[in-house]
Image: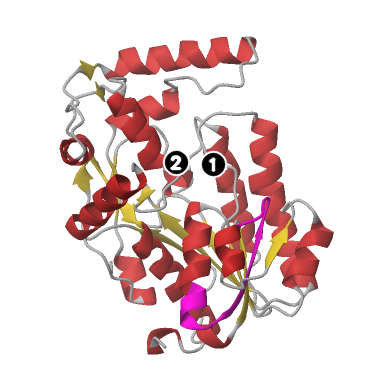
Amino acid sequence: MNNTFSNLASQKILVTGGGGFIGKALVLALHALGADVEALGRNHYPELAKLGIPCHRGDIRNLTTLRRAMAGKSCVFHVAAKAGIWGERAEYMAINHQGSKQVLAACQGEQVPVLVYTSTPSVVFDRHDLRGIDESHPYATRPLCAYAASKILAEEAVLAANSPRLKTVAIRPHLVWGPGDTNLIPRLVARGRAGQLAMVGEGTNMVDITYIDNAVHAHLLAAENLLTSASAAGAAFFIGQEAPVNLWSWINALFARLDIKAVTRRVPLPMAYGTGAILELSHSLLRSGQEPRMTRFLALQLAKSHWFSHAKAKRLLNYRPLVNTIEGMDRLVAWLHETAH
């Protein structure tokens, strides 16, 4: 057993969103530590069931379901969320905000003492470059997608609920990637193979990225902290690799390993932003269920720098990346080749 997590390994734990990319990796890591871990998700997860990990099937908006799953638990990781950059605002709010409030109510009702919440740096992205900012940076006042807006409200609720009876913390991993990814990398690779990617802006923007093992490690460190000194209670933490990367150089390095043509075509940011606005409007008017190929939020994310100071996580959580960016890329490419056959 890893002595770093000696307290965590003895707990009864629930992971909401236990079938998702981060949630499943977290469940498997806790299981490997020897913790008594259970998952809550919308579906059945054979990989977890084969390991004897109990899986509760249900919706985080249902308080009865949550309380049943949390009964007797001493630690909850709230990872479940509606992700993405497009969709009905009401649904994002219902799942991410109201669902998180239900998680808090269930924790309080079942007297769960520790809650670690999976947040996102998108809560502070307000249309401008973010270079090395820390957690004192204010929440965005003009979020351009319902996901970010709903996560702001959810994080605020989680941190406001922190108390001696329920210690809470928010982890903000940025652009999580690695083996098992079902969203970021598959979409990126698919668009690259189809020749549908173009650099937005100058192509010089630097961004934080987070290898999956490092995101999981930060969550475990946060829980261990709350179970011991609780010096991190009520705080949010940016998480990432050892250093930011140039977004387009990193993408092209991945594409080179996969025999995908490098992205060289450039689109000015005003053009991409304007196209996004038009597509958002047309998709809304037509009530299209499909995500627009471009949105205003995506245009800015692809053109602006967004990287963060991890000093607070290093100081209070003793966070250091377990897997560096080069090794992570090697593991990712090996997994992509393996799953392609």
Residue 262: x %, y % from top left: 17, 28
Residue sitting at 19 percent across and 18 percent down?
A: 265
The magenta stretch spans residue 38: yes
Q: Please, what secondary structure does the residue beneath circle 2 have?
A: loop
User: The disc labelled 1 sits on which kind of residue?
Assistant: Ala
Callout 1: few (<14), some (14-19), or many (20+) C-alpha neighbours within 10 Å? some
In contact (CB < 8 Å): disc 1 and disc 2? yes
| Residue with the mark numbered 1 | 83
Tag of residue 183: 2
Residue 87 to residue 99: above or below: above
Q: How many labels does the image show?
A: 2
| Location of residue 38 by image quarter | bottom right
Q: Where is residue 299 in the image (x, y as percent from the top left)?
A: 36, 25
Taking the image as shown, residue 55 lies to the left or right of residue 278, namely right
Which element type, helix, strand or loop, lies under badge 1? loop
On residue 296, which mark appears?
A: none
